[in-house]
């Protein structure tokens, strides 16, 4: 799809420079000095030769067909350079130049014009405002980076060019090699989705690393990521999370959602491993690049120091991994061969005087144990430790075993040579055992994703036309906020069970409604302008007779008019009083990048304080709905705690899927809450007591 970017036969550099230190010079030098086998054509009207390569005054003077043009002229001249590319029939361009939307209003206008040209002539463009592109397979370095990375099996693409240069410099000393290294810049045309699709079937790439600040199309991103992560791991570090989600919101879901929760949900649903830091990004990259996947979660720890072994075991307990339980044969052979003071259970303590032969014996016996899926070898440099020899042995065993081996050689100067040995022979080392455990856990999480079945869709028979007609009337009336009764009508049409309720505009109507429903009742203020009724006493429960109904009507309507004089007060909602069960919340907030973001959590008035919620992006399947419920910290309460009966979780799953269908069917729904959704013990179903909704 992007072949001319990664393996062009001819490259033109528009804006090639004679002056060292200029981008146009450095980029041409990178193309020329790293073994690229294609033809290079510098374009510069003021000289005949740069770096011994013949130059041309314009693109049209070049006799060959050009596969890729790299543009490094100042921003005001980029448009003209692209016009010349169009005349020459060039379909692929990299615009290095800055001075576009990142620079202000004029730059943004320049970028829009550039994009229109590209689209009009079916061209593809990387950039502008980017570092460029490197493909080690074709030895193409179409960038102004200071280094050419070693060939490897990691593809990296980033929105930050400066981050690219730092990582290239760091990778030189870390034995990290790359298949592709791409700076996306402003992503005017080619974006993360295009690159994911291009790398998906690239045989030279085993691991995909991404630095993201945002995505252009959330749905396309999820779909592309779902496909690639079934083939190869994709690890993303996402920045900008602390302020990206700040916005005004009227629902609990809108308040709690935010962009970061949307990204977290998108990553979970598409199999992406999220790294919290750049360090973690490359911790994960190293292990995926060097080692094969573990078949299970059972880890064995081997150490010559008790403290680090305990720290590693603690890290395992906090992770999704499990400490392996050795077979009797393994325990017996370790006990018969190791010193009496050695610990033969997991973690195996080979003691501080362990030399390379003792490490070799233990590693070989432990890795043969059928209960062990992965081994972490910890070494601290003590007086008698044979550091380099132990490293040699570990790499030799690693190369002939079918299970991953990871090391944590702890120290500084004394372990330098051993790190080089393991680095060159593709055994990942981590300076601290916690980081090693975290990387192993990432591998195990990825194995779970690969085994995960495709989501099971469930479509309900609902009254979609009725809701569509209702929304149309709302729009014609110029209304956005549905009152409780209106919102409950919508969710009822999608199969939610609701208590009987009647809107009463007067005191007498309230009494009549209460008698029709049957005492005791609940009375709530009814107004599209009052969304959080309980905040000022707009909800009364347990109303037992006519006198209480009349008093309650007067009190809450008068209080509402006093506190919110501009609110449209419809009267009160008289509702059947339902008791028992546990309160949960279902909600949705429409994320600008990913669309409908579903929320589930414990409900009631403390939702924004406890924040015990989970998120997914609709539409979702059965497994994803179940995971939403299981993810919250208070899930044990729903399962039944201290003798309580478990709640009807199957009906909650059903309700989440109905909500997913509703908000997918109607993109005009911006925010909504069903709070509380009362969940009864198994077999008792659910009851939506309150709802609110906002449409566009």
Image: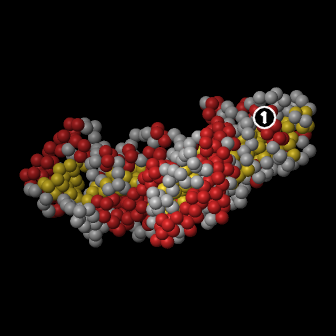
Residue located at (45% from left, 42% from top): 245
Q: Quadrant of the rendered structure where residue 72 is? A: top right
Residue 25 makes an appearance in the image: yes
Residue 570 percent location from the top left of the image: 25, 48
Q: Nearer the viewer, residue 637 or 555?
A: 637
Residue located at (90% from left, 36% from top): 52
Residue 180 percent location from the top left of the image: 70, 49
- Position of 648 relative to 127 (above/below): below
Residue located at (31% from left, 45% from top): 609
Q: Nearer the viewer, residue 636 or 657?
A: 636
- Residue placed under numbered mark 1 in the picture: 26
- Position of 84 relative to 390 (above/below): above
Q: Nearer the viewer, residue 243 or 326?
A: 326
Residue located at (17% from left, 41% from top): 558
Circle 1 sits in a helix, a strand or a loop, which is it? helix
Residue 65 appears left or right of 630: right
């Amino acid at each position: 799809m992007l072949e001319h970017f990664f393996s062009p036969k001819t490259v033109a550099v528009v804006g090639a420079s004679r002056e060292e230190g200029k981008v146009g010079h450095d980029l041409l030098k990178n193309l020329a000095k790293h073994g690229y086998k294609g033809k290079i054509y510098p374009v510069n009207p003021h000289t005949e030769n740069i770096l011994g390569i013949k130059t041309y005054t314009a693109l049209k003077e070049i006799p060959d067909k050009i596969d890729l043009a790299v543009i490094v002229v100042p921003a005001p001249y980029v448009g003209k350079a692209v016009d010349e590319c169009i005349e020459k029939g060039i379909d692929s361009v990299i615009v290095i130049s800055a001075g576009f939307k990142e620079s202000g209003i004029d730059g943004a206008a320049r970028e829009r014009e550039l994009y229109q040209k590209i689209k009009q002539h079916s061209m593809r463009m990387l950039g502008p405002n980017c570092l460029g592109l490197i493909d080690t397979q074709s030895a193409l370095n179409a960038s102004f980076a200071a280094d050419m990375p070693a060939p490897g099996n990691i593809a990296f693409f980033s929105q930050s060019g400066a981050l690219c240069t730092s990582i290239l410099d760091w990778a030189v000393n870390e034995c990290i090699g790359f298949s592709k290294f791409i700076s996306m810049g402003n992503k005017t045309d080619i974006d993360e989705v295009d690159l994911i699709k291009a790398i998906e079937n690239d045989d030279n790439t085993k691991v995909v690393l991404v630095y993201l600040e945002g995505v252009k199309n959330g749905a396309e991103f999820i779909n592309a990521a779902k496909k690639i992560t079934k083939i190869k791991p994709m690890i993303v570090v996402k920045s900008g999370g602390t302020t990206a989600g700040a916005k005004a919101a009227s629902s609990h879901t809108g308040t709690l959602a935010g962009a970061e929760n949307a990204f977290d949900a998108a990553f979970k649903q598409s199999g992406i491993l999220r790294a919290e830091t750049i360090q973690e990004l490359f911790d994960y990259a190293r292990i995926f690049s060097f080692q094969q996947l573990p078949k299970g979660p059972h880890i064995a720890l081997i150490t010559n120091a008790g403290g680090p072994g305990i720290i590693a075991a603690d890290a395992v307990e906090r992770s999704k991994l499990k400490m392996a339980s050795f077979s009797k044969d393994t325990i017996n052979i370790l006990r018969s061969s190791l010193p009496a003071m050695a610990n033969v259970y997991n973690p195996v303590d080979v003691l501080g005087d362990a030399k390379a032969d003792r490490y070799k014996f233990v590693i070989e016996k432990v890795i043969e144990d059928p209960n062990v899926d992965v081994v972490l070898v910890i070494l601290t440099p003590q007086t008698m430790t044979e550091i380099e020899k132990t490293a040699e042995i570990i790499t030799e065993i690693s190369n002939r075993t079918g299970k991953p081996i990871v090391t944590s050689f702890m120290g500084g100067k004394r372990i330098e040579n051993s790190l080089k040995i393991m680095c060159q022979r593709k055994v990942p080392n981590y300076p601290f055992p916690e980081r090693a455990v975290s990387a192993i856990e990432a591998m195990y999480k990825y194995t779970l994703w690969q085994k995960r079945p495709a989501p099971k869709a469930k479509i309900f028979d609902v009254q979609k036309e009725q809701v569509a007609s209702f929304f149309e009337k709302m729009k014609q009336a110029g209304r956005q906020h549905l009152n409780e009764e209106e919102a409950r009508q919508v969710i009822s049409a999608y199969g939610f069970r609701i208590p009987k309720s009647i809107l009463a505009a007067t005191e007498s109507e309230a009494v009549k409604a209460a008698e029709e429903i049957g005492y005791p009742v609940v009375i709530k203020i009814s107004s599209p302008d009052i969304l959080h009724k309980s905040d000022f006493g707009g909800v009364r429960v347990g109303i037992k007779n006519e006198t209480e109904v009349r008093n309650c009507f007067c009190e809450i309507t008068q209080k509402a008019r006093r506190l919110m004089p501009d609110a449209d007060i419809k009267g009160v909602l008289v509702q059947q009083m339902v008791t028992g069960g546990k309160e949960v919340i279902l909600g949705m907030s429409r994320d600008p990048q990913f669309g409908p973001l579903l929320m589930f959590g414990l409900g009631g008035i403390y939702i924004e304080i406890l924040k015990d919620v989970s998120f997914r992006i609709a539409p979702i399947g059965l497994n994803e709905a179940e995971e939403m419920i299981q993810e919250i910290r208070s899930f044990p309460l729903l399962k039944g705690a201290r003798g309580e009966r478990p709640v009807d979780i199957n009906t909650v799953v059903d309700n989440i899927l109905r909500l997913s269908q509703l908000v997918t069917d109607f993109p005009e729904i911006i925010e909504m809450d069903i709070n509380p959704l009362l969940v009864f013990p198994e077999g008792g179903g659910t009851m939506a007591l309150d709802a609110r909704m906002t449409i566009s």
